[in-house]
Amino acid sequence: MTGLARTGRKSGITMPIYNRTVAAITLRAALGRKRALLFAVPPLILVGVSALLRLSHPADPAWPARILGDFGFSVVLPLTALIIGTSVLGAEIEDGTIVHLLATPVPRRTIILTKFVIATVATMVFAAVPELVAGLIATGGTTRLAVGLFVGALFGAVIYNALFVCLSVATTRALALGLFYVLLWEGVLANFVAGARILSVGHYALALASAVVRDPALKPGVNLATAVVMGAIVTVLALAVAVRKLASFSLRGDAA
Amino acid sequence: MSADATGVIHDLGYQRYDGGRLGRAQIVRTLTAYSLRAAFGLGRGAKAKIVPVSAFALMCAPAIVNAFVVARGGARAFPYDTYSAPVRMIIMIIFVAVQAPELVSRDLRSRVLPLYFARPLRRGDYPVAKFTALATACLIMVEVPLLVLYAGTIASAHGGGAVWAQTRALLPGLAVGLMWAVTLAVIGLAIASFSGRRAYATGAVAIYFFLSLALAEVLIGVAGDGTTGARLGGLVSPLTVLDGVRQWLGGTSPGPVPAVGSYGAAYGVMLLAACGAGAAVLAARYRKAGLA
Amino acid sequence: MTSVELDSVSHWYGNVVAVNDITMTIGPGVTGLLGPNGAGKSTLLHMIGGFLEPSRGRLTVGGSPSWRNPDLYRQIGIITERESAYGFLTGAEFVQATARLQGCPDPAAAARRAIGLVDMVGPMNRRISTYSKGMRQRIRVAAALVHDPEILLLDEPFNGMDPRQRLHMMDLLGRLGEQGRTIVFSSHILEEVEQLSGTIQVMVAGRLAASGDFRAIRRLMTSRPHVFVVRSGDDRRLGAALIGRPAVNGVELTPKGLQVRASDYGAFSADIARLARDEGIRLRELLPADESLESVFAYLVTS
């Protein structure tokens, strides 16, 4: 009889990591229509300002690190990751449309990982690539700084999105908490308290960038080994927690 | 029970209310009061209070630290007109980003605007009430820490002269706080009113303020001290514009914007333009809002 | 054939017990879950559907628990009460996506069939955000049916449907039930339930108040003692006349009127009209004093 559990290849469930249908829905939900324009604004500003400064201050060597580091890396990257990372899953949970995904045999791990991949790639497109482009414009082609920050941003995109996807499943106030983390913990605390840097994703990414660039202007708070290890731990842990929480997703009583 | 084929309307004792009715002013007052409570999460569950309460506590933290410092004999740790600039800027961004959507996005999402406007409430009253509420909430967030700073300082002050000096220094600080409250409230509400999803509204407000602030700081830093670029760099962000206006009006404490010199008037104009734009956007948004 | 088995299942939210010690077996055919709002019907359906963990007790669907068991969804189709839908997808895209997620071998064909079943072929290429409430409900039913599930759980499925759509949906569900599927749907409207289901489970305040054939329960409900309040031109004389009738158990004069306890309301209704006319008493008002669903169910629980 149809409908009974059976083994074998089925369309859309060929790999236990990535599901094309989930990906398609997530992409359209997160980036559909006008919303993609919002994501595009910060990177456009980044690239635009870099171009402007290049035209007005071609010789000054100090400003590229500031634009790319203080603006691109420390602000555009985490905020873009925050918006994208919390909306790939958070919006569906808030709407209730997540039920349509959950009432299917698709493994929860697949749902989380697919959304995580979409979010990370989107963040790379909307934050890391513009960082590279802005870097190339700013340094006029001497690519070390630009490439270094690009690599760091890729790394940061991965970890940030794992963290924010996990937050979206764990709480309904994921965006607010994420804001607190990015603005307060990473923005203020990590600058003043040395211990806080060990738990700061921005510093992990900066450490990787610094290892590629070896520019004294970048001052990561942790060394490369710590950054890579902690980054990996945070990513894996966050995704694992997210999968567990999604597997125990509960619908509360009558009409939310 | 009448059995006429023609039909009758029975008198069930339904009574009309002919007494006095509270008017439009009362509605606006009530809406403002309710929104002010909502801005601090009062009247909702405990979760709604987390962000405002912790933001308020963090805002007061420098003032409390100052009380200890002054008691030990030190000088006042923070100026009245800038307070602790990084703390104030970041906390207020978070506060407005999270609470402005609580005021306007919820109503959009649950589509209750037709209910509001089916009362003797004019189209313009609603945004005015919401703005007053959020501005008052921001005022509390900004001025109370200043007052705590003041109280902590004069508690260890000696003599009437010292107290009077502190008071004179406090008043301009309060005026700066007022500017902050008005500006942040109107811009925050204007941005938040575009989305019924609280998360998106929060993100939009936070991104706007924080991104523009970071951009302004970078431009100022890049341009170098004393140059025109540094003086004008602050125009891109409302927070630095506020700081520029503060200096133009006589504030002397150092802040995120370097000495503006002769460009102070530009900052003043920019502030008025930003507030005006925010107010216009809000008004236009609610003139059109129907079932959307 | 898959059945749903509940054994002393309870669920509580903090201090509030939403589902209180329910034991029942749901077999093939259409079963209606009837009860007033807040009776715990949604909670029960969510538990059966694997979206809530029972705080106590054992709940199995086709032999295995539904909690944390995504593979079971190949056999289950669920429609929640909350009207959530991907507004940006068209109806056809939504059902087809569900078919793919369910692992159907030919998603496009399955989707077309399901959409045809719910009579949504016309608007299927429009965005769901343009649908009316009833259309949204029907497309969700299509998505729940697309993988041909053995078990169908529907939470207030007729919400928002106009009479024609409701008839059509009832017809569909009836046919599916006759095919041997296990269909459970909840409602607080008695007529919906009795038109569609053979078996009903009545829930009140989290407890199972009655189960079985709805006709038998109906008889139990109607042959219980009723209380009426009558206001007439002469309550005392009317009361004296009524107490002589066999359908009347008791009569009491109260300030609000004449309170009559009747054991058989059918016979009583005929009696009072005739008596009033014979005695020449004008009847002003005749109200049942305990017709709420809760009191009916309360009676069922205690009897």
Image: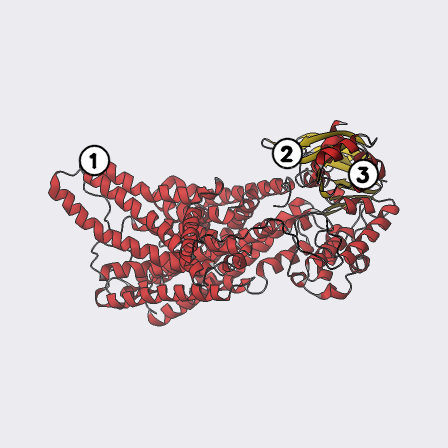
> In the picture, residue C58 is in which quadrant?
top right
Q: Identify the amino acid type marked 1.
A: Ala
Residue mark closest to the camera, 3 vs 1: 3
Residue pointed to by mark 1 = B71
Residue pointed to by mark 3 = C275
> In the picture, residue B182 is in which quadrant?
bottom left
Q: Identify the amino acid type marked 3.
A: Leu
Residue A28: give its label: none
Residue C255: give its label: 2
Horizontal and vertical percent position of residue B54: 40, 42
As drawn, is A7 to the left or to the right of B58?
Answer: right
Q: Secondary structure at mark 1?
A: helix
Q: Residue at x 73, y 49 (%)?
A: C157
Q: Chain of mark 3?
A: C
Q: Identify the amino acid type marked 2.
A: Pro
Q: Chain of mark 1?
A: B
Instruction: Classify mark 1: residues with Cα within 10 Å, few (<14), some (14-19) or many (20+).
Output: some
Can I make out residue C24 in this image? no
Q: Residue at x 18, y 42 (%)?
A: B75
In the depicted view, which residue is nearer to us: C72 or C170? Answer: C170
In the depicted view, which residue is nearer to us: A229 or A40? Answer: A40
